[in-house]
Image (cartoon, grey):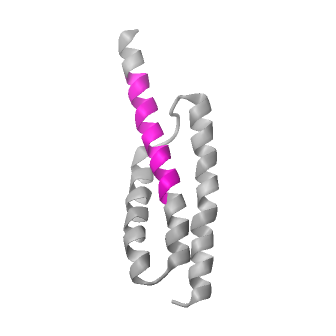
Amino acid sequence: MGIWQDLVNGGFELLGAPFILMSIIKLHRDKRVRGISWIHILFFSVWGCWNLYYYPHLSQWASFIGGLFLVGMNTIWLIQIVFYSWKEKVWQKKI
């Protein structure tokens, strides 16, 4: 793959991070998980981790840097979903 393709791919990955950040902020404000499945976020987080291993082998450094941000945001969002889901289950048991 050429350098411009790496820059485009890296740009998409980097731009994906702020979109996920919007979901992180919304979930932090709501503190309730509604209409979100952790399964697809786990899948894309694992795929992103694979990309962090794979991109350097292709010398795709822009994609790697963008992937760092995307995986970071996905991981934070996944942790939030698990935490707030667990917290709600605990709270419901106390009622």
> Is 14 above or below relative to 30?
below
> Is 67 above or below relative to 30?
below
Q: Farthest residue toward the bottom? A: 2
Q: Is residue 43 magenta?
A: no
Q: In the image, which residues are magenta?
A: 71-89
Look at 50% across and 33% down and name the residue there.
33
Q: Quadrant of the C terminus?
A: top left
Query: Is 36 or 27 nearer to us in this picture?
Result: 27
Q: Farthest residue toward the top? A: 95
> Is 39 above or below relative to 46?
above
Q: Position of residue 65 (x, y in %)?
A: 53, 68
Look at 42% across and 78% down and name the residue there.
56
Q: Position of residue 86 (x, y in %)?
A: 38, 29
Q: Is residue 79 magenta?
A: yes
Magenta region's main secondary structure?
helix
Judge left or right: residue 58 versus residue 63.
Answer: left
